């Protein structure tokens, strides 16, 4: 203890006091650092601000200031008098029911509207970690039954509606949701099969992935629509919506398999070896240890595939299925509204953007949670 008393005690260094900046000061620092760090960056920033400002002013004048929101019936003379200087948003309240629900019976359109609400509720519930339990699969199965009952009807006072009358947003959500819901497990199985030590399984998985990824989605839809019924027994006829759904599942499974395989390759080999040392079976090792780590590595490309897949549902037009974009195109066949297709496409674009942006934001939240952990 006496030796410690002779050790010189140096005073602690006094650092520069931290400056508490206001919100305005923080914004000024961010602007100076990111937008005006040099003369060249300042010139480019000012040019871009001028271009964007002019575009925003023109968009404001066309979309809001000079726009017409309501007309009486099909009298579009006021809209035509604008000669393109203003938007005619009156086409949306006039045609929105056809755009959203297609040729579904007018008095029964509350049923596809309820289906859309059910889908959105399922998306919200499934995004919450607190609901990631076995009961979630039962909830999805029950929702599938309810959606089918609502869309087809035929009981409880609801009239029967064939799939030929389905269209609009419910069809887009059905194709995208169930295509991904069944394609994702298929992709995981194929990704594991490509890493299998059994040559037969590995070769079949490679053949499936290369065959599906080597042809356009349009050709798969044609094959499902034309060739698939030829392989069915006599008297068995599968509806074209189900055929398109099968094509989407196979398409999604092939692309998701490559994304998941990339994640599997990013998992250190020591994780599998440690699981083998613990005596875990092949499926427990992959389900509990390898796959959770692999999926965490590939969250951005997975969501990118989901977004692209959601937008690719518009290709079902070629086999006569009326998805959201197809009903929008059909809605402006009316001669009175043919000149206002831009407004209709903007409306549909907002719907697509809402779903894709929600997926993108959810992906970023998952990435942030992974980084924190």
Image (spheres, rainbow, N blue to C red):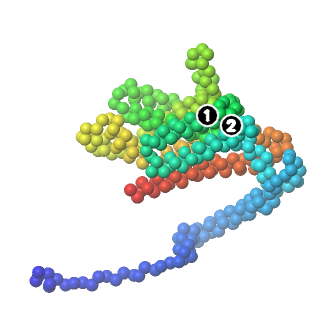
- Give the residue furthest to the left: 2
SS under mark 1: helix
Residue occupying image coordinates x 50% and y 41%:
139
For residue 47, above or below residue 71: below
Q: Which residue is drawn at 54% across and 54% down?
A: 361
Report how far apart the C-alphas of labels 2 and 1 lie in the structure.
Answer: 16 Å
Give the labeled residue for mark 2: 167
The image quarter in which residue 18 lies: bottom left
Answer above or below: position of 113 versus 16: above
Q: Can residue 318 be seen in this view?
A: no
Q: Nearer the viewer, mark 2 or mark 1?
A: 1
Task: Give the structural element (helix, strand or loop) at label 2.
Answer: strand
Circle number at residue 105: none
Q: Where is residue 212 in the image (x, y as percent from the top left)?
A: 52, 31
Q: Is residue 331 left or right of residue 252?
A: right
Residue 149 image label: 1
Q: Where is residue 136 in the image (x, y as percent from the top left)?
A: 47, 42
Residue at the extreme top of the image, as rendered: 234
């Amino acid at each position: 203890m006496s030796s410690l008393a002779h050790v010189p005690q140096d005073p602690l260094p006094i650092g520069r006091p931290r400056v508490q900046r206001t919100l305005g000061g923080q914004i000024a620092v961010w602007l100076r650092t990111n937008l005006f760090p040099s003369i060249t960056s300042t010139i480019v920033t000012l040019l871009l601000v001028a271009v964007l400002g002019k575009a925003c002013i023109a968009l404001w004048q066309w979309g809001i200031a000079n726009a017409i929101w309501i007309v009486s019936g099909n009298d579009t003379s006021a809209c035509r008098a604008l000669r393109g200087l203003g938007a005619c948003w009156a086409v949306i309240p006039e045609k929105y029911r056809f755009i959203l629900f297609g040729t579904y019976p007018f008095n029964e359109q509350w049923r596809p509207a309820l289906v859309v609400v059910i889908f959105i509720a399922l998306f919200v519930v499934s995004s919450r970690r607190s609901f990631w339990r076995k009961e979630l699969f039962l909830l999805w199965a029950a929702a599938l039954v309810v959606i089918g009952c609502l869309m087809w009807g035929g009981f409880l006072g609801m009239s029967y509606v064939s799939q030929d009358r389905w269209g609009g947003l419910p069809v887009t959500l059905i194709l995208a949701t169930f295509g991904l819901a069944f394609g994702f497990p298929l992709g995981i199985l194929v990704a594991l099969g490509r890493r299998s030590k059994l040559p037969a399984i590995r070769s079949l998985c490679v053949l499936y992935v290369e065959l599906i990824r080597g042809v356009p989605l349009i050709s798969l839809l044609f094959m499902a629509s034309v060739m698939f019924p030829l392989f069915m027994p006599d008297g068995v006829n599968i509806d074209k919506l189900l055929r398109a759904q099968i094509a989407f599942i196979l398409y999604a499974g092939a692309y998701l398999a490559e994304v998941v395989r990339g994640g599997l390759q990013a998992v250190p080999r020591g994780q599998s070896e440690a699981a083998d040392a613990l005596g875990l079976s092949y499926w427990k090792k992959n389900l509990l240890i390898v796959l959770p780590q692999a999926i965490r590595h590939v969250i951005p490309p997975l969501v990118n595939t989901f977004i692209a897949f959601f937008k690719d549902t518009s290709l079902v037009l070629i086999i006569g299925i009326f998805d959201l974009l197809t009903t929008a195109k059909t809605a402006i066949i009316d001669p009175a509204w043919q000149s206002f297709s831009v407004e209709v496409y903007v409306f549909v674009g907002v719907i697509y953007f809402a779903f894709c942006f929600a997926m993108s934001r959810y992906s970023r939240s998952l990435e942030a949670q992974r980084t924190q952990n």
